[in-house]
Image: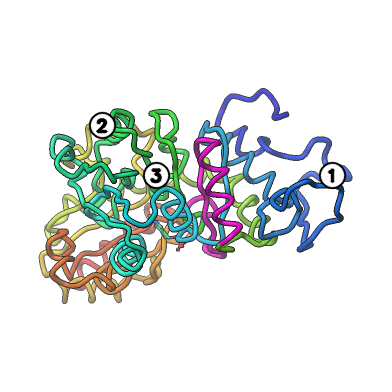
Amino acid sequence: MDKPTKGIDTRLIHAGEPEPRIEGAVTMPIFQSSTFEYRGEDSYYALRYIRLNNTPNHVALHRKLAAIEGAEAALVTASGMAAITTTLMTIAGAGERMMAQDCLYGGTHDVMRLEFPRMNIAVDYIDATNAASWRESLTPQTRAIYVETISNPLMQVADLRATTEFARAHGLVSIIDNTFASPINFRPAEIGFDLSLHSGTKYLNGHSDIVAGAVIGRADLIEKINRTLSHFGGSMDPHACFLLHRGLKTLGVRVRYQNASAIQIARYLSTHAKVAAVNYPGLEGNVGHLRARELFDGFGGMMSFELRGGVEAAAKFISSLTIPISAPSLGGVESLITQPAKTSHSGMPPTERERAGISEGLIRLSVGLEATEDLITDFARALDAC
Ligand SMILES: *Cc1c(COP(=O)(O)O)cnc(C)c1O
């Protein structure tokens, strides 16, 4: 049993750890063994084998992740996309539909646009900030409603309470991609989400050195998704489990530092003459600010902004920076900066990108753990140069 602990920081360290400790080891050892001795297990899924997601490294992580978000169960996967696709293919099948936020992570949007039609799964896109408009997208075949806590790359905050209420009223499974918020800033189960998905590649691991995913939520659904994962094979390797487990322990200190640093940077950028707009839910003027303040414990380390000089200024700005690295991905210890139109959303047709409000010159920043003053000094110098 887990120790009777309260704070999320204590759960990050101690929840799910094996008891008694294995050979007294203070940290969870890596069980780099594909298969385990047969001990009379009476079903295929009970056999211990890495693809069946039940080695000691998997089991400890599942318990820890469930405890962190205050949910019944959890499951780790080989990537965030494995978590998303395995979950959606479990919840909806041929001839069925799902409702989804209209501005999604590029990879999720690609799956819905390029893969789902072949499986005869249809997606009805909704303005997730306007609950009054959802009813018209509901059909007898609709199985789920899918949103992101903070949308990428415009940092919109969907009407998350209305999402769970709508799902409950119409018998849908409510699913949220909680990657950008992380469990430090938002725990979806607390307002009734059935399933919370993560790219563990980002904040959960936090060190830009693995790809990983997680599904956290209702035990009955997690059991079904685990079966699907065992069939499709997007299972996490024990060494990646170990790294994710290790990264998770510092999630609280990392994310709270990033929250504090990001709000200072967002305020600095929003008052600069060369900056046209800053998208960050922590800013008082942001459309999602009140909702974010009500629901979240922090506004996160992600923001996007546009320069008055557009695409050309954006390229010059990024190449003039000395601290943030120009690279896709996010949530690591190093600040990363990208132009979504060239990276995460390059698979989206330009007309759709424009409709979603993602301009060619939009810049996305993932705030790392560097000194905030150093980052602001670097931004000031790069803005002078463009
Ligand atoms: C990165 C990301 C994913 C995909 O995760 P991978 O680990 O790269 O497969 C999904 N959703 C969001 C919000 C992401 O940022």
Dot 1 crowding, Cα within 10 Å, few <14, some 14–19, many 20+:
few
Say whether residue 221 is magenta.
yes
Q: Mark 3 or mark 1: which comes first in sequence? A: 1
In this rendering, position of residue 25 left or right of residue 49: right
In the image, taking residue 240 as reference, residue 219 lies left or right, namely: left
Residue sitting nearer the eye, 44 or 264: 44
Residue 17: quarter of image: top right
Task: Kindly indicate whether the residue at mark 2 contacts the one at mark 1 (C-beta within 8 angstroms).
Answer: no
Measuring from the top left, give residue 151's x and y in whole percent. 29, 51
What residue is drawn where x is 68% and y is 38%?
16
Please give the residue where the numbered disc 1 appears in the rendered image.
22
Dot placed on the residue nearer the N-terminal end, 3 or 2: 2
Magenta residue check for 16: no
Residue at 35% over, 60% down: 108
Q: Nearer the viewer, mark 1 or mark 2?
A: 2
Q: Which mark is residue 306?
A: none
Disc number for residue 181:
3
Task: Residue 369: tell me if it is visible.
Answer: no
User: Which span is picked out in magenta?
Assistant: 203-231
Quarter of the image for the C terminus: give it.
bottom left
| Local secondary structure at mark 2 | helix
173 vs 333, left or right, is left
Q: Residues within 10 Å of mark 3 (few under 14, many from 20)?
A: many
Ligand 1: quadrant of the figure: bottom left
Residue 96, percent from left and from top? 32, 51
| SS state under label 1 | helix
Alpha-carbon span between mark 3 and mark 2: 18 Å
Q: Amino acid at mark 3?
A: Ala
